[in-house]
Image (spheres, helix red, strand yellow):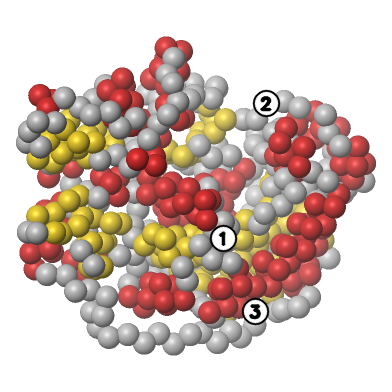
Amino acid sequence: MFPEEFRLKIKQQQYIDSEELLQALERSSPVSIRINRKKWKHNPVNSEPVSWCPDGFYLKERPSFTLDPLFHSGCYYPQEASGMFLEKIFRQTVKTLENIRVLDLCGAPGGKATHLSTLIGQNGLLVANEVIRTRASVLAENLTRWGLSNVIVTQNDPSDFKRLPGFFDVILADAPCSGEGMFRDKIAVKEWSVENTLLCSERQKRILREVWPALKENGILIYSTCTFNPEENEKNIKWLSERHKTGSVTLDISNYNGITEIDYEGIRGYGFYPGKVEGEGLFVSVLSKKEKQTGMEVKYKQGSDRGISREEKNIAEKLTHFSADNLIKQNEEIIAAPGNISDRLPVLKNLRAIKSGTRLFTVKNGSYKPSHELALSIFFRSDSFPVINLDYTGALFFLRRGNILPGDSQKGWNIVCYEGVCLGFVNNIGSRVNNYYPVEWRIRMDTSSSDKERIIKWYK
């Protein structure tokens, strides 16, 4: 099943029990999810907790996430368990959350980005970046589902972040890699080659070199890959440390069995190896920046990005729990902006932002139209609209953009809910009810009775 060159490489690698690893990679991947406690208080039935993430759970079987309305409402994220260790890293290395600025450099599809947006709190700012346009759209979609407003999604090359010198307190570089840790997936095995591991190593060096100036003095760099290859892992961190003043950060893993501590010429790294941990393969290393870094000067006029009227503020107050200080107007759209102006303005001026904060509603001709982002926001006052409660079949019909019958709704805007959480808006115009679920998000997959059973029974 595995390339012979790969087998030979890992047999020679320190820290790895190659036979144990190969046997583990031939077994099915563990299924795990992370609950969004801002939206959902229930735990999965017949599940086991992920020891290093209080909101993470292993499931006994894989439900059809695509056919689960709770996934589309942002109640949980299907995330690989090893990657959830980010929470312990963050809590051990970040001393204060006061107006913290965090960059997730290679953010798609959004597992670590949604996790970070929860960890930093509403006063922090997360810049979640992805250079590839289609993947950046997926990243923005998943963060919209998650429902927090402390995020700007950007689509930029790592070199563009030089425009923000000394700006970030924490940078996560979950770098593209040769994917050895994902070898339970046949596609990952097929794409692997020795040549590709070398290309990945050079690309990772460029990523680290380009983004390093954006980290402030004494800031934290979290570097991770999903591969076992030392050339892409500890040797890359050593390469960066030889060119800059850094401190290798030691993590406390004493409470977590199976994580392997790696010591490479003074560089500390941590290996998650299938067979030893219940998760996919992962490498992570943490550096602190020990050299002086000149920050950027931010100039702006007070209220320079506001432009919102008293009437528009009143509408926002009626619909949301956002503070008026967070509200701005762009063209006809009212937005709950992330962070404060000194945080977001440099990002918006220097990078290509495709999502910033939470779009609430548009104002036109004396009336307003609510945004789908508002429906999914944790700050939405769901009682500000008539509620249509749907069962599983009805929720799937809505998520396929089916039109609900007028008799099921009041005239005007209604919020559609399933199991007490919001899915989106419909508008009853009298003769029909228009479905405002985003066209590009609609479900196309068919539903079987077994899918329904697996979905309905997975939580309690």
Left or right of residue 29, residue 308 in this image: left
Q: Which residue is mark 1?
A: 131
Nearer the N terminus, badge 2 or badge 1?
A: 2
**Rounded to the nearest whole Å, what is the CA distance between mark 1 and mark 3?**
28 Å
In the image, 458 versus 54, the foreground residue is 458
Q: Which residue is mark 2?
A: 28
Nearer the N terminus, badge 3 or badge 2?
A: 2
Q: Are marks 1 and 3 in contact (CB under 8 Å)?
A: no
In the image, 181 versus 55, the foreground residue is 181
Disc 2 residue type?
Ser
Q: Nearer the viewer, mark 1 or mark 3?
A: 1
- Mark 2: secondary structure: loop
Q: Please report the residue visible at 31 percent of the width from the left and 20 percent of the height from the top.
A: 393
Badge 1: residue crowd in 10 Å (few <14, some 14–19, many ≥20): some
User: Does 214 sit above or below residue 104?
Assistant: below
Q: Please report the residue visible at 65 percent of the width from the left and 34 percent of the height from the top.
A: 278
Disc 1 residue type?
Val
Q: Please report the residue visible at 44 percent of the width from the left and 87 percent of the height from the top.
A: 297
**Rounded to the nearest whole Å, what is the CA distance between mark 3 and mark 2?**
42 Å
User: Does 343 sit above or below residue 20?
Assistant: below
Q: Which residue is mark 3?
A: 290
- Mark 1: secondary structure: loop
Badge 2: residue crowd in 10 Å (few <14, some 14–19, many ≥20): few
All told, the count of numbered labels is 3
Q: Nearer the viewer, mark 2 or mark 1?
A: 1
